[in-house]
Amino acid sequence: MKFPLSLVLVSLVLSLSGLAQKPLKTLPWGSYTVRIEGSPGGGQVARILAGGRTAVEIEGWLLSASFVEVTGKAPRELLVTDFSGGAHCCLTLYLFSQEGELRNLLYEELGDGVFELRDLDGDGRSEPVLTRIYSYFGDLPFALSPGVVRVYAYDGMVFYEATRRFPRLSLREMERYRKGFLEGKKRGDLEAMKGNALGYWANALVIGRGAAAKDWLMRNAPFEVRKWLLVNEEALLRSVSAFDLSTNRKLPPEKP
C-alpha cells in the first residue's frame, strides 16, 4: 500500500477560466470548493478549486466525495472515491488534507477490495480498514476467494499498518473462515475448504498468528487441501510480507 505525501497520480491543473460542465455535486471544504461534473468523453471529473482555479483534477468513471475525520484537525479530510463499474472491480481512493497545505495523504487502487473508515480506539479519529480480496488465488473461483483485513493508522505525517494494534477484526475473520472450513469439511467440499483455509491462515498471518494457524490446518485439513496450501505457501507469505522473501530458505539469495 502506498501513502505518498505529495499529490500522486493526480493531475495538477491551473484553470483560469470557468468550468464548462454543469457540476453534479458541489461541496464547500474550508478554503476550497469540491466539484464533481460530467466529462465530455464520458465518466466524471472531480476538481478541488481554490479561488475559482483548479488545484487538483481527478478523472474517473463514477466519483463520489465525502468528508471524514482522520487527523483530528479542522477541516475534516476529503475522501474521493472512484468506482470503475463492472463485475469484481475496481475501487480507487484519494484522501486529501488541508493540514499545513493541500496534501494527498492516501492513494490506493483497491481493485476488488472493500474500504471503510472506523474509529477503532474511540479517539474520535477514524482508521482506514481495507479488505483485500485474494481473487482467484491458487485457481480458486472468485466466489470462494477470501478477504484479508488490514488496518492503518495516521501518525501525524503518514499512514502506517496497525493491524496488530487492532486484532479484533482479524480474529473475527479467522473465526468466520474456520467455521466455513469445518462446514466445508463436513460436506466434503474441497474448494470451500481451500478458500476458507486460505482466509483463516492469511488473517492469522497479519496479526502474527500464522504459525499457530498453519499448525491447526495441517492437523485438520485433508491431504488434498494441505498439499494445495503448501504449494501456495510462498505466494501467501509474499502477499503479507513487508519485505521480499528470499527464494532460498537456507542461504542468502545470490547477487544479480
Image (cartoon, rainbow, N blue to C red):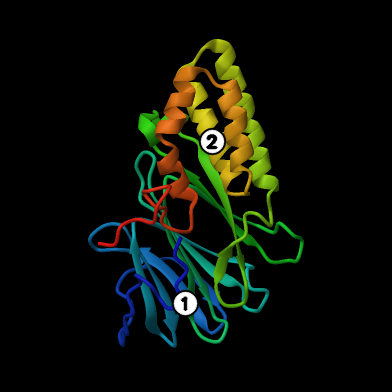
Q: In the structure shown, which secondary structural element does the residue marked by tag 1 occupy?
A: loop
- For the residue marked with disc 1, what is the amino acid? Leu
Residue 97 x %, y %: 54, 76
Residue 195 x %, y %: 49, 29
Residue 147 x %, y %: 51, 40
Residue underneath mark 2 = 199
Q: Residue at x 54, y 29 (%)?
A: 196
Quadrant occupied by the C terminus: bottom left
Q: Is residue 130 above or below residue 30?
A: above
The crowd level at tag 2 (other Cα within 10 Å; few <14, some 14-19, many 20+) is many
Q: Is residue 4 left or right of residue 76?
A: left
Q: Residue at x 56, y 27 (%)?
A: 218
Q: Is residue 229 above or below residue 209?
A: above
Q: Image quarter for residue 187?
A: top right
Residue 75 x %, y %: 62, 78
- For the residue marked with disc 2, what is the amino acid? Gly
Q: In front: mark 2 or mark 1?
A: 2
Q: What numbered label is drawn on residue 208? A: none
Whole-number angstrom distance, CA of label 2 to CA of label 1: 32 Å
User: Which residue in the rendered view is the most extreme toward the top?
Assistant: 187
Q: Is residue 164 above or below residue 86?
A: below
Is residue 208 visible to us here?
yes
